[in-house]
Amino acid sequence: MSAPNLIGMLPSELEDLAVELGASRYRGRQVATWLYRKGVVDLAEMSDLSKDFRAALAERIRAELPELERATPSQDGSRKLVFRLEDGARVSAVVMPDEGRTTLCLSTQVGCGYACAFCLTGTMGLTRNLTAAEIIGQLLAARAQLADGESLTHIVFMGMGEPLANYAALVQSLRVLTDAKLGLGYSPRRLTVSTVGLVSGIEKLAREDLKVNLAISLHAASDEIRSRLMPVNRAWSLEALMRAVRAYPLAPRQHVFFEYVMLDGVNDTPEEAQRLVRLLRGVRAKVNLIPFNDWEGSRFRRPPLPRILAFQSILLAAGLTTTVRWSKGEDIGAACGQLKEPVVA
Ligand code: SF4
């Protein structure tokens, strides 16, 4: 078995490791600062650590980022980054600059086991979970190739995989991201975990006191349609899902996001819009309507624009904040539900 990876370890774990190696906790804090604040991964470059301590570290751990295999720019300014992992598996992250913010979309699994009918990633099946090192590693590697003055202001867990199905690595990553003193220092309000609706995972996340944003891939407002589109709905109905969502603790002015891929003739009727209004009643909700991105072999189509706008206007009239999100990166296979890479080299 290979040595544990330094990347993705909590600052407190790095302090414990330093003590185990006979050094002070302060040495662990220095390592955390190099990794997460300065983005330096190579132990040899951590110049304020003694040679002996670096040698002791190198015997116990390794510090390796996922290999950035390709960075593909899109016409809309987003970039798809494809990483090759140690076992040859590939995952993608997407950098999306937009109106003064730059959002990074991270993957949490190789493939996905939830088989949503409209999703290209879902056709891959699940290969394995990513480790916290591989999740945080995507971010550090993405950060290293930013232009001067550019920074990753927001992080969304909406890439390949279902974050809550890789719960331990997700929460470890969120703790590294939100550690204000020695971690990556993100406000939880800038982090969003997107889920297909794993009720037990939402309930667990609610108890972690992480206060990150929650996004629900909803895609239908009735069990009948949702179960056809998303097999997970057969395990957890909309009623169970909405019960967990209503119990998720929100800070003042914080919302739950609902993602809704619009599929021609499937979930885009005025009746479904009315059902959605009823379903979200009393929830501090923001709805993102995502016109479907066609992919080869898919049996779904994007609805015509007037139908999308008519659906939106029903939600707006009911007082629901609703945006139509034209997915970023459509031309590079980086849009929602399009993150598919050949899994093994
Ligand atoms: S939409 Fe999300 S949960 Fe569903 S198959 Fe695609 S990646 Fe998996």
Image: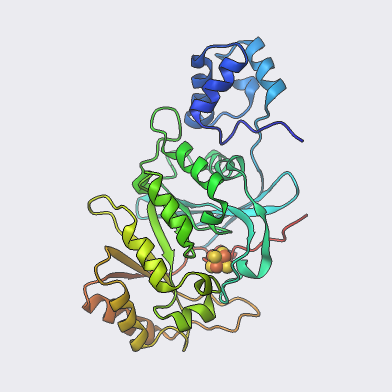
**Quarter holding residue 309:** bottom left
Q: Is residue 73 above or below residue 172?
A: below
Who is closer to the viewer here, 288 or 162? 162
> In the visual, does 40 lie left or right of 225?
right
- Residue 234 in the image, given as x and y percentages of width and height: 52, 75
- Residue 7 in the image, given as x and y percentages of width and height: 59, 34
Q: Is residue 334 visible?
A: yes
Residue at horizontal 58%, vertical 14%?
49
Residue at horizontal 64%, vertical 38%?
65
Who is closer to the viewer here, 240 or 18? 240
Q: Is residue 109 above or below residue 272?
A: above
- Residue 29 in the image, given as x and y percentages of width and height: 49, 21
Ligand 1: which quarter? bottom right
- Residue 207 in the image, given as x and y percentages of width and height: 39, 47
Q: Looking at the rendering, in which quadrant would you find the C terminus? A: bottom right
Residue at horizontal 65%, vertical 70%?
123
Residue at horizontal 41%, vertical 44%?
208
